[in-house]
Amino acid sequence: MDMLPLDLLMFATLCVAVVSGAPIAFVLAGTAAFFGVVGWWFGVLNFNLLGALPTRVFGTMNSETLVAIPLFVFMGMILTRARIAEDLLRTMGTLFGSMRGGLGVSVTVVGALLAASTGIVGATTVTMGVMALPVMLRYGYGPAFSSGVICAAGTLGQIIPPSTVLIIMGEVLSAAYQQAQHSQGNFASRTVSLGELFAGALMPGLMLVGIYIVYQLIIALFRPDVAPAMSAEVVARDMGVERKGLTFSEVVGALFPPLALIVAVLGSILGGIATATEAAAVGAVGATLLAGLRVGRNRWALWLAVIGMVALMVMVANFDLRPGGPTTSLFDRPLIVAAMLIAAVAAVGIAVVWYELGRGGILIPAMGSTARTTSMIFTIIIGAILFSLVFRGLGGEHRIKELLESAPGGPHGAMIAVLVLIFFLGLFLDYIEISIIAIPVIGPPILAGGIDPIWFGVLVALVLQTSFLTPPVGYTLAYLRSVAPRSVTTGIIWKGAVPFVGLQLLAVVIVYFLPGIATWLPSKLF
């Protein structure tokens, strides 16, 4: 069997099966099951190894970090169903549409805001494709340029936290980093928290937004036929605004709620006030209240919930409100009772908001979408765990470790090879499979070479984001193709994405040679 390595055949079979279009979770599990039997038949694989599958699945499903996934997905679904993105796009389009390239800049800014509040790439791309693309085309924006701007803005949800990519990667990267330290004899190893990874991705994400905007302004300056200026009246009319311009209160009313949600979620994580899972719960409730602010009629319930939650957060930050806690005093008992009453009042307000969202056709579809998306993610994770077990049992882990250790250029040469490999894998595999399968295998030997785990994780996320945008298989391109008019062909969308793929690669190169962009903020905050 040395002449016919089953681990390499297994990986090649996976790549071929993915292209067939079959559900990826079943492709992973089916490929693993087939090669597990083949490996056992030829005496290469010890079948007892698969006995670890239930324990690994149970441990993964019990992970507190991964609990944040359904909460963040629910937050994004609620905001999408409540049409928060449309309000943002109307406001930003009206503000910037009268300058050259202004609509493109508006789409990028809205994409960044949605990435920081929803993190759902498909929903962001489709929403902006439906709203902004027809307006951009109608008033002279180049179809390729417009498509590229929208696709690039949609992928920002991959790198700007809270991102599902970063949540899953944070879990496996922490385990890989601990394994790397154990291999070096350090059994008092430190871990990598999701908050650190969020902090590391924030600056590169904002840098990428800046690169996009600068590129669009340069194109608008030298090629006004591709990104022309529009009159304020035209922009206002096509963005659904009744009059020219916006008042200060209208701008604040559109921008403040999502910005407040972003600050509440990311600020609590980066400030060390809450874990990512706790912040996700705050974000889910906050998104519900934002949706209630938009469609609800009983404003008293909304304010009841908001005031109650703020009061609870202030009390929890200053007093020990745990009944029977080690530091609970007689003075704290009345505060505990008061906190219970405030929580009950806030719960009543939230229940009224939920009832209104249910009647408005927002809550139930959002819950259904969250359940389907979460089930899909965790089914893929289970399939990837089985694939990883069999792949390791067939010797794939040792083969990859030997290849990385023999790579020219030492640890940095190995890391460049890994990033190139992940880029090509990202053209065919989803980020979930790559994170669960690739990072546990390639992570320990890379990190054992002294590579900073936050820097490595951010570079992997940027490369995966680039794959999402790269023709011909880029997922974001397919999302836009599903809602673009017939005049915008698939070839035009691919042509528009190519310059932004170059900008993405530029961002990867910048972060590679200036690792402080990714490591400075975590070092200051944590």
Image: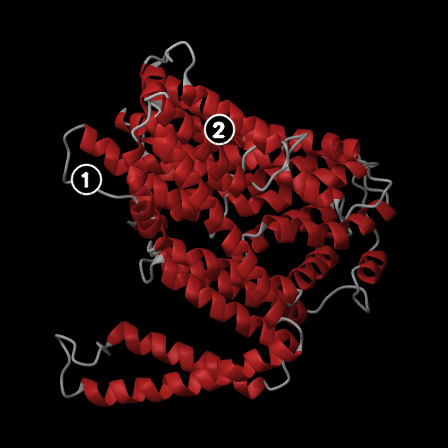
In the image, which disc is placed on residue 189?
A: 1
Is 216 displayed left or right of 376 in the figure?
right
- Whether residue 221 is situated above or below residue 114 in the rendered picture: above
Residue 46 x %, y %: 29, 29
The residue under label 2 is 422
Residue 117 x %, y %: 53, 58
Label tally: 2
- Whether residue 338 is situated above or below residue 55 in the rendered picture: below
Q: Can the viewer see residue 76 in this picture? A: no
In the image, which disc is placed on residue 176?
A: none
Mark 2 or mark 1: whose residue is earlier in sequence: 1
Residue 128 x %, y %: 71, 52
Q: Quadrant of the N terminus?
A: top left
Q: Amino acid at mark 1?
A: Ser
Between 185 and 402, the one lying in front of the other is 402
- Whether residue 331 is situated above or below residue 102 in the rendered picture: below
For the residue labelled by badge 2, is the local secondary structure a helix, a strand or a loop?
helix
